[in-house]
Amino acid sequence: MKNIIITEKQLEKLVDKMKNNITETHQHESHMSKQQLYTIATLAFKMWEELEEKENKGESIRLEDWMESKIAQSEQSIISVVKTFMYDEKVEDGDAPADGMNKLGYDDLIIGN
């Protein structure tokens, strides 16, 4: 492979182009995540409403074991993502302690009951 010599200005253009590509890719990924979160929230709320309605009518509610397991796994996964996201946002804003998780643990962030 030959050595390629470029000017500082060409290097800046190349780096800017790479940054733009990374930013565009990240925005697309974030957009997909937003859509997925919306779907999860919408379907979970719909199911919760159905369960609540049946409960109010006095109907017995019995989910299969695999359903309860998947719901529990999903809850833990979402909690993990949200806690990390919230922590990362706090660090980026400069509000977190300098030594990060040594002073703020995941369990310090409470979600739900």
Image: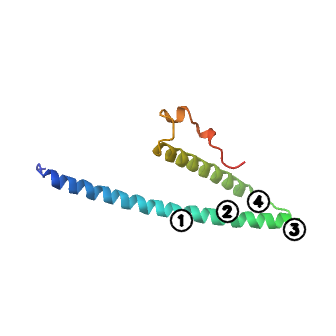
Between the residue at mark 3 and the residue at mark 2, the CA separation in whole angstroms equals 20 Å
Q: Are marks 1 and 2 in contact (CB under 8 Å)?
A: no
Numbered tag placed on residue 66 in the rendering: none
Q: Which residue is mark 1?
A: 35
Residue drawn at 28 percent across, 56 percent down: 18
Q: Residue at x 68, y 55 (%)?
A: 71
Residue wearing tag 2: 44
Identify the residue at image location x=65%, y=66%. 43
Q: Secondary structure at mark 1?
A: helix
Q: Viewer-nearest of labels 4 and 2?
A: 2
Drawn side of residue 89 relative to residue 8, left or right: right
The amino acid marked with disc number 3 is Lys
Disc 4: which residue: 63
Q: Earlier in the sequence, mark 3 or mark 4?
A: 3
- Foreground mark, 4 or 1? 1
Amino acid carrying label 2: it is Ala
Residue 57 is tagged as: 3
Q: Amino acid at mark 4?
A: Leu
Under circle 4, the secondary element is: loop
Which tag, 3 or 1, sits closer to the chain's start?
1
Residue 70 x/y as whole percent? 66, 55
Q: Is residue 7 left or right of residue 79?
A: left
The CA distance from mark 4 to mark 2 is: 14 Å
* Label 2 Cα neighbours within 10 Å, binned few <14 / some 14-19 / many ≥20: few
